[in-house]
Image (cartoon, helix red, strand yellow):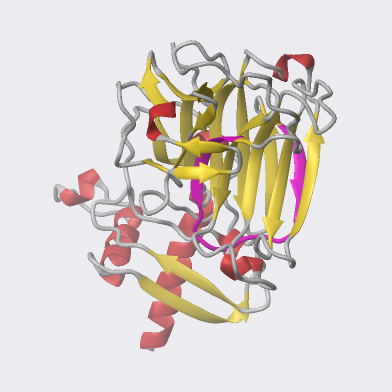
Amino acid sequence: MKRRSKMGNFTGRVERGPQLLSFHSVDPEIAGVVLIRSLHSSRFTSDTADKGAAPGEGNRLKANLRSALSSTACVLFLVTAPLAAHALPVTEDPSKWKLTLADEFSGSTLDSTKWANRLPGKRNDAINTANAVSVGGGVLTISTYTDAGTNYTGMIGSQDKFEQTYGYFEARMKFNSAPGEWSAFWLTSPVFDGHVDDPATWGTEIDIVEHRAVNGDNKDISGKYVSAVHWDGYGTDHKQVSTVHAPDPGVGNGTWHTYGLKWSSEGYEFFYDDKSLWVTTTAISARPEYMILSSEVRNANWAGTIPTGGYGPLGTSTTNVQVDYVHVYEAVPEPAALGAMCCFALALRRRRRR
């Protein structure tokens, strides 16, 4: 049975309704911006008013709102008085966030509308191949194996299929790592590499979880994992902040856990089994990024030494990462804040008519 995400119930079908402005993204130094989507068929429409009942105060307000806003376009109001960045807060109640992507890996093949095999060919000390990626039994499996002395592994990404700025990204995963290999759930920007000095514009690499069996000294670290933020490309200007999590002994090989990232204009917050473990406000990306699920092989490096003889053939290798689900959410304003936005917009419109 699928574990229910901490972000609340869902049907597996993503409803892409109107996108609502997050005021976490408003620069407090500029004039406030109020973005109102169409109210056509929105929650503000009163059934009784539409059926011709005598309108009361509430119905008159709704009628005014509908007449003030186009049924097909957004209306943008710029006000002269600055608004505090949190004057209209984004909800902190996870159950009220909007699901924007859900993959339960419930079929028998990778969902090509969400994912594609990434970077096929040689990478470090293995070859990335689609043969290493399989879906079955309700999980995604990325296997690492050896055939005729050559190591193979795989990775998938949502580039050009799903990218999002800010929100909550969560995967339920089980690692079966081995020396010389590591697996990860991470985000990056399509224009990250080759640009420096402006991570907000060019994006960052956000490692939600990187798991290894051993470290560079071949010491067992399977009960730990790394979260990190990288920026300024992969060249000589590369920078990063990172932390090692050792939340409990159960994080080691062969156990299911959820790994999450809450990303906003204020920073990054990293979660393990619904618990916040690390917050950083360094190098905040403000552009759309895509997700990657990956395994990699590199000998005598930060994940230790490849076993003698490799990892075994595909059919018998026990080195893999499995993913039960990936869920992505988008924060929306609190209902009270949305009402305030609408009323403010209407008042401003009436004032300009005088």
Quarter of the image for residue 23 reads: bottom right
Is residue 292 one of those drawn in magenta? yes
Out of 12 and 193, give the one closest to the viewer.
193
Give the tally of numbered discs. 0
Per the rendered image, the range of residues in magenta is 276-296
For residue 114, side relative to residue 22 (left or right): left
Percent position (x, y) of residue 199? 65, 66
**Residue depicted at 50% across the width and 17% down the height:** 3
Answer above or below: position of 254 versus 341.
above
Quarter of the image for residue 215 reads: top right
**Residue depicted at 37% across the width and 54% down the height:** 160
Q: Is residue 87 visible?
A: yes
**Residue depicted at 61% across the width and 22% down the height:** 310
Percent position (x, y) of residue 91? 57, 46
Q: In the rendered image, which quarter contains the N terminus?
A: top left
Is residue 185 one of those drawn in magenta? no
Answer above or below: position of 207 versus 223.
below
Out of 41 and 155, give the one closest to the viewer.
155
Q: In the rendered image, which quarter contains the C terminus?
A: bottom left
Out of 8 and 353, give the one closest to the viewer.
8
Answer above or below: position of 210 versus 234.
above
Percent position (x, y) of residue 175? 61, 21
Percent position (x, y) of residue 44? 33, 51
